[in-house]
Amino acid sequence: MRTHVTDRIRNLGILAHVDAGKTTVTERFLYLTGATHKRGEVHDGTTVTDFDPQERDRGITIFAAAVSCDWAGHRINLIDTPGHVDFSDEVERSLRVLDGAVAVFDAVAGVEPQSETVWRQADRHGVPRIAFVNKLDRAGAELDTAVESIRTRLGTVPLPVQLPIGREDGFTGLVDLVGMRAYVWADGADTYTDRPVPDDLLEEARHRRRRLEESVAELHPGALEEFCGEGSLSARTLTGALRDLTLTGEAVVVLCGSAYRNRGVEPLLDAVVSYLPAPSDMPPVRGEVPADPEAPFTALAFKVSATATGRMTYVRVYAGTIGKGDTVLDAVSGRTERIARILRVQADRATEVDVARAGDIVAVVGPKGARAGATLCAPGAPIVLEPPTTADPVVSVAVEARRSTDTGRLATALARLSEEDPSLVVRSDPETGQTVLSGLGELHLEVAVEKLRRDRGLEVTVGRPQVAYRETVAQGVTGLLYRHVKQDGGAGQFAHVVIDVAPLDEGEEFAFTSAVTGGRVPQEYVRAVEAGCRDALVEGPLGGHPVTGVRVTLTDGATHPKDSSEMAFRTAGRFALREALRASAMTLLEPVTDVTVTVPAESVGSVLGDLAARRGRVTDQTTRSGTAVVEATVPLAELFGYASRLRGRTQGRGTFTTRPAGYAPAPRGQDG
């Protein structure tokens, strides 16, 4: 049931590649809505959302920051997400609780590798999006080229609703193709003047408006009916159809501007309200929790932050209402927690509020054990919502305190880090006794270690990064028989299994099937064998690495009337698969990444030679306006220290980005 309260809320994220301008877009949102009184600039280190010292030092977004503002009678809860691949887990957790997103693209570069990655993440979560082509004031900026890259690289239907007025340095405004009005910004002006479409652009604007109407009519039945009957679409019909197509994901509304110069941001805010969904527009979570403030309280914790004033848990309220002093149930741990304070967050600042209702994104103080992914709900109406997925770490470093007296403090600080960021994993190496910190990339671990030093005042030493290898079956075995018999007085254990092992198709991790007939192994024991096989996948025979890409078929077995049990068959499954893997031909796999290197054209030869030396395989190479873009697939282990090497080879003018590309066979002897 739609409610007035949730209709006037927009929960959205800003998604983009590094340096596309998403933090500047967020800052302009805050400034134009009156949430801040000064425009924050990334290059000056004065932004609201990039408030962490490391973000300001590095000039990139590292931690997803939540802010709120009001526009046209609507509350906008906004999350500025990181653009670097090492922090994609922050994006994943944010997308899980958002209703919509603004995808920001560079008008010169178009769709870049990480913008494609976050777009695919949003696809998986079914998050409706609109696009903003930024930096139209840059040399080489071209709206139509950027729109075409959205069409070809993202596989969607872009619907441009604006026409730029002027090019590059002469970019001064926009023609709104829906309302057929011109918006022009004077130099230094915070807002635009609304004018008729200039005469020299009128014919092109009419042509583009016609193309927009035709594209919408092809996709929207209601618009098609009016288009066929009237020969055109009214602004009201066009707006409604664009909203419908945004909500279904059939098309993407494209706007444009220059956030740095404050041009195009107000129409973008209007588009957020017009086209992106309210909580009440979204299907009920798990099919059973409607966005109703009167329903039992249900919320998902998506981020935990330890601050100087205490532990804050960021939650998206899906249903019901929560107030200060209320008691909630952590449905994952089963413990009850008291809500001491409710905060409406502005990045590193917060305003206390008395209640939070369905559709809100707020931080709560009080819960001591809730982790990211936990469901907080009314004690009388327990429910568990699907948590965000967490990526497997691919890079590890050994960390230890320089002073032995700090060992305990280091353990506590690492536990706090992994609580705040579930993609950081802390474990103890059983062979060396070292504490190992694992994450999603070299920069991810650099930031984590620097956080230990800055925030906790710890002096730590860090080992050389190590990548996370995997093992897989190249050629399996058939008919491996394993008998588990144990008799030590009392009830014994008996399990007899026969298994076949074979490789799986690339990208698949594990498959288990049973071909046993005649009830020789009861179904509950078959499930136990599968569980035992999964246990055996933790350590492979080559170097103790996790095993992937394995198909196991249970072909036969036998039971004992008294001594057989699920435990016995689980044990048999574990040892049978271990033996089968030792008898199979195994291959070591290493993580590989897709790398996009952007360098001056005169440096491309040197860069290509360096990539070849790093076992890189070049997949594409283009040159435009004196700049070369090289795409290659490179083993992750070969990229450690690449940033400084690239800067040296290109006099500081080269940049590169990466994104995970899965695993590939490693050369013999590669794993230490």
Image (cartoon, grey):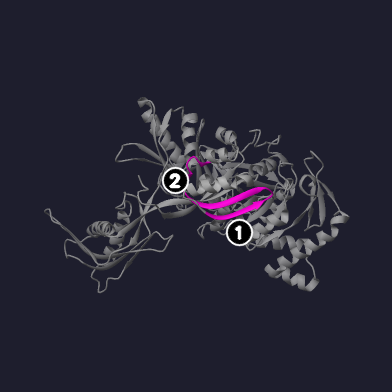
Q: Secondary structure at mark 1?
A: helix
* Image mark count: 2
Q: Is residue 589 above or below residue 479?
A: above
Q: Quadrant of residue 177?
A: bottom right
Badge number at residue 72: none
Q: Secondary structure at mark 2?
A: helix
329 relative to 623 in the view: left or right: left
Q: Is most of the magenta stretch helix, strand or loop?
A: strand
**Type of the residue with mark 1:** Leu
Q: Is residue 217 above or below residue 84?
A: below
User: Measured from the top left, where is residue 355 in percent x and y?
Assistant: 58, 42
Q: Which residues are magenta?
A: 618-642
Q: How far apart in space, not on screen, are marks 2 and 1 (Cα)?
A: 29 Å
Nearest to N terminus: mark 2 or mark 1: 1
344 relative to 165 in the view: left or right: left
Residue at figure coordinates x 33%, y 67% from the top left: 513
Identify residue for label 2: 637
Identify residue for label 1: 154
410 relative to 520 in the view: left or right: right
Residue at figure coordinates x 70%, y 41% from the top left: 28
Q: Residues within 10 Å of mark 2 (few under 14, many from 20)?
A: many
